[in-house]
Amino acid sequence: MANAKDEMLSTCLKYFLQHGIRKMSNEKLVALLGISTKTIYKYFKNKEKLLEEVLHLYHDQRYEMLQNLPPGQDTVSLLFDVWRNAIETEPRVSKLFYQDLDYYYPKLAKKVESSIAKKFSDKFIEMIEHGIVEGVFRKDIVPAIVLEGIYALYVSIVREKQYKLLSASTYEILQNTIAVYFRGFCTHKGITILDRHINQYNATQKSTNPKKY
């Protein structure tokens, strides 16, 4: 059962993701949580310390999803779905969240990113190496470099402006960036599996969201 501090962090995370960080004044925080200012300072030295713990909670939740991926699925489909899901769910996060974080708390953002980056990259590299053993990823690739390429595309799609200027859906952008990049480091076997997986996903989306296709 979550304690008072955990509930505060969870509520603040939800607010930050929806409305950005700057708008969360101490007065709004008190009203949102239904607690006193004294209670806030009981758990957190200042707003920056609160934000630091909120960011760790955010990344912990994302890492937990990685740890609980469905078993039995081939690696190429699984890895593609992880990044597809990340790109498709990112628009639910307010643009202000990342803007405020980068503008007002750049050192904190870098500090938290540095502390969690290794466990995420280790997990992804493990998946890519498993894909090489499976025969779906090429043997001549360097997993760490491949991962940096995926991440660079991901950041440019969800956080930069260039793709937002195009009259294309998030999924169309995904199909013409991440999906193309994946094919570049897949073997013939991997490409066949990936294309089949994407076609199945597209068919499912067409039947459930016909207006989008």
Image (tube, rainbow, N blue to C red):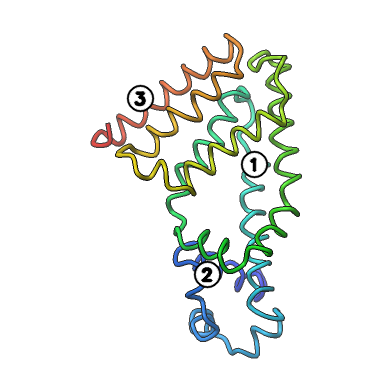
Residue at 51%, 76% in the rendered image: 24
Please report contact status of discs 3 and 2: CB closer than 8 Å, yes or no.
Answer: no
- Taking 24 as reference, is 156 above or below it? above
In this view, the residue in front, 135 or 180, is 180
Which-is-in-front pick, marks 2 and 1? 2
Q: Are marks 1 and 3 in contact (CB under 8 Å)?
A: no
Q: Quadrant of the C terminus?
A: top left
Label 2 sits on a secondary structure element that is loop
Gap between marks 2 and 1, in whole Å? 26 Å
Disc 2 to disc 1: CB gap under 8 Å: no
Q: Which residue has dot 1 on it?
A: 66
Image side of residue 114 versus residue 104, left or right: right
Could you say which quadrant of the image residue 52 lies in?
Answer: bottom right
Q: Which residue is mark 2?
A: 21
Q: Which mark is residue 117?
A: none
Q: Tell which circle, 3 or 2, labels the residue nearer the N-terminal end.
A: 2
Q: Residues within 10 Å of mark 3 (few under 14, many from 20)?
A: some
Measured as percent of width and height from the top left, residue 81 is found at 53, 33
- Horizontally, residue 46 falls left or right of residue 192, namely right
Mark 1 and mark 3: Cα distance apart in space: 25 Å
Kindly state the secondary structure of the residue where label 1 is placed: helix
Residue at 62% across / 45% down in the picture?
65
Of callouts 1 and 3, the N-terminal one: 1
Classify 156 as above or below 180: below
**Label drawn at residue 203:** 3
Examine the rendered structure and indicate whether residue 12 appears above or below residue 127: below
Quadrant housing residue 5: bottom right
Between tags 3 and 2, which lies in front?
2
